[in-house]
Image (tube, rainbow, N blue to C red):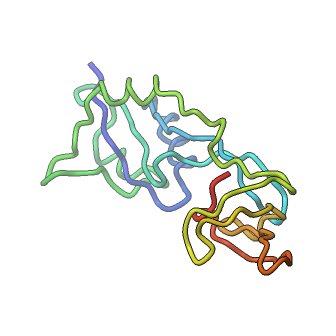
Amino acid sequence: MKEWYLLYCKRGEQKRAKAHLENQQIECYYPEIEIEKIIRGKRQRILEPLFPSYIFIATQTESGPSFTTIRSTRGVVDFVRFGTQPYQVPVSLIEHLRSYQVDESNYGNVPVSGQTVQITSGQFSGFDAVYQEADGEKRSILLITLINQKVKVKVQNTDVEW
């Protein structure tokens, strides 16, 4: 019977580690999520790891590769351990993660230019504003009305409800 373990990988090398582990006939689970980001001013949908730097693997301890062989695989740093022994991940957790479908309909969505939004916190809390454009990945440029005049302000995306 296969047992599931959690591996810690070198930063940004999870895909390399997964490829090398699969070459050794080790079952890997590397959950990714598709999100929408603004990169260089353009809205793009990209895949990002759900758990950066971690990969779940299933191996048979009696007949599969040894822990030393797995730890020596390119991209892998070590097993996640509690004490001296690698932590054995419950199968129910893997099944739950595989069955869980993330609702991506609102995740990472950015309003369109001209859409009315509400500022929920910060110095302009309670103001209604008009979305202009994104200012990087974490801020937006909004138009608010102050003393009967439209003023551009930069607001953290976490402070805005759209």
Looking at the rendering, which quadrant does residue 26 occupy? top left
Query: Which residue occupies 47% across, 39% down?
Result: 21
In this view, which residue lies farthest toward the left?
A: 83
Horizontal relation, residue 39 to residue 72: left or right: right
In this view, which residue lies farthest toward the bottom?
A: 147
Using the image as rendered, state which of residue 98 and residue 157 is in the foreground: 157
Relative to 118, say whether 150 is above or below.
Answer: below
Which quarter of the rendered picture does the N terminus lie within? Answer: top left
Using the image as rendered, state which of residue 55 and residue 156 is in the foreground: 156
Relative to 46, say whether 150 is above or below.
Answer: below
Query: Which residue occupies 30% across, 50% down?
Result: 79
In this view, which residue lies farthest toward the front?
A: 148
Looking at the rendering, which quadrant does residue 4 occupy? top left
Horizontal relation, residue 66 to residue 104: left or right: left
Query: Which residue occupies 77% across, 61% down?
Result: 39
Query: Which residue occupies 78% across, 65% down?
Result: 134
Using the image as rendered, state which of residue 7 and residue 24 is in the foreground: 7
**Residue 143, position as x, y percentages in the image:** 81, 70
Horizontal relation, residue 69 to residue 28: left or right: left
* Number of marks: 0
**Residue 130, position as x, y percentages in the image:** 80, 61
**Residue 81, position as x, y percentages in the image:** 22, 51
